[in-house]
Image (spheres, rainbow, N blue to C red):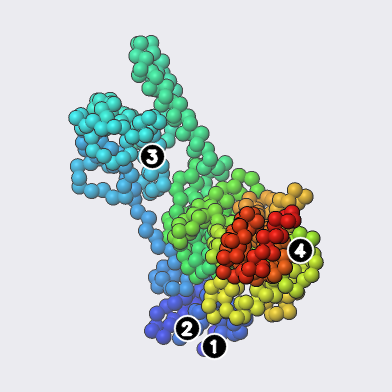
Amino acid sequence: MSLPLSPGVYIMRDSGGKVIYVGKAKALKNRVSQYFGSHTNHTQKVINMVENIDTFDYIITDSEFEALVLECSLIKQYMPRYNILLKDDKGYNYIKITNEAYPSITAVNKIENDGAAYIGPYMSGYYVSNAVSQARKLFRLPDCGKKFSADTRIRPCLNYHIKLCSAPCAGKISEKDYRESIAEALEFLKGGNKLDIQKMTEEMEKAAENLEFERAAKIRDRITAVKKMSEKQKVVCSRIEEQDIISVITEDDKACFEIFLFRNGALFDREHFIVRNIYDLPQARSEFISGYYYMRDFVPCRISVDGEVSDKELLENWLSEKRGKKVSVVIPQRGEQLMLVEMCKKNAAEHLAHQRGAVGKELMALNELGKLLGLPKPPKYIESYDISNQNGTANVAGMVVFENGKPLKSAYRKFEIKTVVGQDDYASMAEVISRRIEEYEKHKDEETGFGRLPDLILLDGGKGQVSSASAVLSAKGYDYIPLFGMVKDNRHKTRAITDTGKEIAIGNKRNVFTLVSTIQEEVHRFAIGYHRQKRKSNAFRSSLTEITGVGEKRARLLIKHFGTIANIKEAEIEELENTPFLNKAVAQNIYRYFHNTEE
């Protein structure tokens, strides 16, 4: 098919005629031709998509801007599998007040014909949940969901003792006073998060003048609670009145986009979307933003993102036209805005990690580490190595494995250095990496243990160790495995990561620093533990092998049979003679050795 060099939209279909991808282009011929050229520079997503393309069609537009608008519309219409798809399931939210002697206040997403009263609707589920939670704490309302009556008498829970509940279950509050608390809570909810503290102060002073000290104390405590709540809310406030913040965390082909919505300088709502087919982050951010705001009537004047966005100017023009005023897409670099972007990113990490039962901070650390080292994806499977010896004796190495940011102890391995004589950590490291690759080539069909290659290798050492190991990987054709060293300061604490060139500081990257420090401490502990075990074993054997008739094999059997050198020394001659692998002459030699000479 001959394609024009005009802007437009192209539509890819599979053999069944189903639309699998919709894209836009400034020049249709150039863009579409790229798909059917060499696969060398293609992402896995594009390779998979091209394999499924049977036919394609295109629509010419007058401008790239019109192509963007049409692309959004067609994606919404066809929901193609290889586009980033967002399901807009956002509904209305309500505050429900049950109709009973001791009413309860809850956040719900629909109205039922159950005799209860409802306040709403609200668009923000975050706002409703947060407001109800605050109201319960301020007015000491139960959140256990139990039904109460004047006759209820059970032991109050912890919330009563820490002053978060008035314990109607234990009869600690009358029905009249409880209903008064409910009424005040509803006034609070209808008025938003800002109670009139001045009005409350006047009521407190009036109660005190009337000698109603208990009521005055109650109002005083409520004023204090409101002030504390206000202070807490400042954590999620911004000096910019109106903006959305968007961050993304990726893992393999899956990602979580998190959106914080700020209105009047406060966090008004938040949403998250789990999406697939993520390989190009700038393109993914662009597709997400266009898809998200295509489904929304409102566009803020500012959208802060955590990284580069493809077609940024075109996207800003489209967003500005939709809003009717200028819209900016920015990447914060410092200060409050960068902190909010990072907070948004942490929430995205938690949501994505929750899907696979992991911990968000570990996923966050792996994303940051991959980005810092320039890796194509977060290093899910990390191997780390350390050499340990004492003046060249008992020369060993330890290998530890971290999967998804956690130790995978079943994959730990020990190496006894075989080809290096004396103390040469560089040559020892080269031997270990060489043997590791040889083991992979033997077991690569197994896909576990040595049969699995790491996404990243971290060595406990600097440029020398990295250079030696890199030479081995290159010689064996595995130089595509990322390899770095972990550098310590003069107090033996992790300071930086290095390759054969410059060092990469990690002190200002808290998540990365914690992860790398943990790996370095773990591999050092494992290697030195094996070294001590080896040295102790060598000491035992060297002591016993001085005895006539006792070699390496018999020394190991003695240690295994008696447990310790001290037990062998304390054994009677008859016990030694009755040991299965000792003859009478050797037994007597052992007895004379320990009783006629010092250990």
Label 4 CA crowd tier, 10 Å (few <14, some 14–19, many 20+) = some
**Image coordinates for residue 468, horizontal then vertical, percent:** 76, 70
Give the quarter of the image for residue 391: bottom right
Could you tell me how far apart the alpha carbons at marks 3 and 4 are, in whole angstroms?
A: 64 Å
Asked whether residue 419 appears in the rendered view, the answer is: yes
Q: Secondary structure at mark 4?
A: strand
Residue drawn where x is 73% and y is 79% of the image = 475
- The circle on residue 318 is none
Judge depth for marks 1 and 4 and give the one in front: 4
**Image coordinates for residue 122, horizontal then vertical, percent:** 36, 46
Q: Find out whether the residues at labels 1 and 4 contact each other: C-beta distance under 8 Å.
A: no
Q: Secondary structure at mark 1?
A: loop
Judge depth for marks 4 and 2 and give the one in front: 4
In the picture, measured across the screen, residue 468 lies left or right of residue 247, that is right
Could you tell me how far apart the alpha carbons at marks 3 and 2 are, in whole angstroms?
A: 51 Å
**Image coordinates for residue 367, horizontal then vertical, percent:** 59, 60
Task: Name the foreground residue: 483 vs 58.
Answer: 483
Marked residue nearer the N-terminal end (4 or 2): 2
In the picture, measured across the screen, residue 485 lies left or right of residue 407, that is right
Could you tell me how far apart the alpha carbons at marks 1 and 4 are, in whole angstroms?
A: 73 Å
Residue position marked by numbered label 4 in the rendering: 393
